[in-house]
Amino acid sequence: MGGFEINPGVGVGPVTFGQSPSEVQAAMAEQQMYEDWMGGNLNDALLFQGLILGFDRCDARGPLPNSRLVEARLAGRPNTQIFSRPTADWTRDELLAFLDTQEADVDTKQPSYLNVASLGLSVGFDDAGKVEYIELWEPAHLLKQGDHEHRG
């Protein structure tokens, strides 16, 4: 498995928002797998190591063929980067300082995560302030569905 660049508002690794399930499966080129952190009720998603890729339409068997990728959740996926830096190297304070240089409107109300709705990005942190998980969503999907709520 190669390194994955997390691109807020665009996608993650070889996949981009708007792709169909078959396009995502071809781009991922790895076996799907379930991990305990993923939880349940994931009929709308394809599951990979440390990665949930969510689609806008599904049935009881999974994402529909004509559905579109609209969100990604990452936790414990090795070799990821965000803003050209290894994800595991970021602390909450460092990421907040970086986002301030980008003039991003960051919601800092909760000490355990940062939410940047304009980028389609939420980052959760462990007790030591290190990145624990990342959620991405397609900003256009956000506009259709209302404000993104942190799932933490």
Image (cartoon, helix red, strand yellow):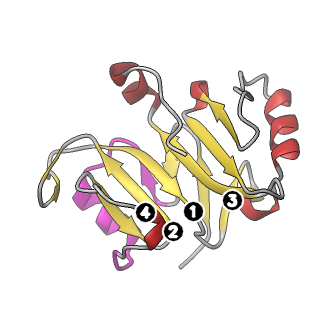
Query: Who's the residue at 83% across and 52% down the image?
Result: 91
Q: Quick check: marks 4 and 2 in contact, CB under 8 Å?
A: no
In the image, residue 140 lies at what x, y percent?
A: 40, 26
| Tag 3: amino acid | Gln
Of residues 8 and 106, the one nearer the viewer is 106
Instruction: Determine crowd level at label 4: few under 14, some 14-19, many 20+ residues with C-alpha closer than 10 A.
Output: some
Disc 4 marks a residue whose amino acid type is: Met
Measure how far apart labels 2 and 1 are at the Cα level. Answer: 5 Å
Residue wearing tag 4: 38
Q: Earlier in the sequence, mark 3 or mark 4?
A: 4
Mark 2 highlights which residue? 50
Residue 143 against residue 125 in the figure, above or below: above
Instruction: Of the two numbered discs 4 and 2 on the same chain, state the one appearing first in sequence.
Output: 4
Give the total of numbered labels.
Answer: 4
Q: What residue span does the magenta drawing correspond to?
A: 14-32
Q: Secondary structure at mark 4?
A: helix
Q: Secondary structure at mark 1?
A: loop
Task: In this rendered view, identify the residue nearer to me: 126 or 117.
Answer: 126
Locate residue 89 relative to residue 125 in the image: left or right. right
Q: CA distance from mark 1 to mark 3?
A: 12 Å
Closer to viewer: mark 1 or mark 3: 1
Instruction: Identify residue type, mark 2.
Output: Gly
Do labels 1 and 3 touch, CB within 8 Å? no
- Please give the name of the residue rendered at 42% of the width and 59% of the height, measured from the top-left corner: 52
What residue is disc 1 on? 75
**Which is in the foreground here, disc 4 or disc 2?**
4
The residue indicated by pointer 3 is 81
Q: Earlier in the sequence, mark 1 or mark 3?
A: 1
Membership of 17 in magenta stretch = yes
- Residues under numbered marks 3 and 4 in contact, where contact means CB atoms less than 8 Å apart: no
In the depicted structure, whether residue 75 falls above or below residue 63: below
